[in-house]
Image (cartoon, helix red, strand yellow):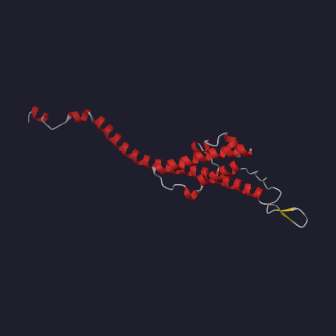
Amino acid sequence: MTSTDTLDLDLDLDSLLNLEDSFYDEGYAQGHRDGLRQSAFESRVFGVEQGFQKAIVMGRLHARARFWSARIRQQQKPALQTVEGEMDRAGDAEELPALKANERLQRNIENLLVYTESTTLPPANTDDDVADYDFRLRKALDIVKIIERTIGERDQDDIQTNNTANDIENPKLKIAEF
């Protein structure tokens, strides 16, 4: 066996020189596949969190609309007189004052109830349904601002954050509040 016979072995020296590149490419491809799987999971979790936060805001707005509506009905309902001549009420001394109703205020509260009614909100996660939900939420937030200015009251959480619309982008939910 001569020295030339030993050199004729099938050694691919180019593959040895590119070993680092091949490992890099393989690691990159594997990381890309893992990243796609993980990002799909994380995006679903993020979507659920955002949907939940929007639902909480919408629920709070609907509760406020129902509360204002009840206060208007309270003002419109004639007070019942007891035998002693005092007003007979279901509540106690901590009852909130009735809202002085006007047509514009009643219409705004009714519109707020319509925009925030949970049975009419789109339940699907399609682009059109999400756009409709966001549109209704923004309209509801605008109506709340008008009602607050009309009656001269603001939600305490809104006073702390100085922005009701901020609830959508960066809600500061405190579980203890619920």
Considering every residue shown, the one lying at the far right of the view is 84
Q: Is residue 55 visible?
A: yes
Q: Position of residue 127 (x, y in %)?
A: 46, 48
Considering every residue shown, the one lying at the far bottom of the view is 83
Is residue 109 left or right of 77 when viewed as pictured? left
Q: Position of residue 15 (x, y in %)?
A: 23, 36
Residue found at x 58% / y 57%: 118
Quadrant (top left/top right/bottom left/bottom right) for the C terminus: bottom right
Is residue 146 left or right of 137 when viewed as pictured? right
Residue found at x 88% / y 62%: 86
Q: Quadrant of residue 158?
A: top right
Q: Position of residue 8 (x, y in %)?
A: 12, 35
Q: Quadrant of residue 71?
A: bottom right
Q: Position of residue 52 (x, y in %)?
A: 56, 52
Q: Is residue 153 visible?
A: no
Q: How many marks?
A: 0
Viewer-side residue, 8 vs 88: 88
Viewer-side residue, 142 vs 21: 142
Q: Is residue 56 above or below residue 79?
A: above
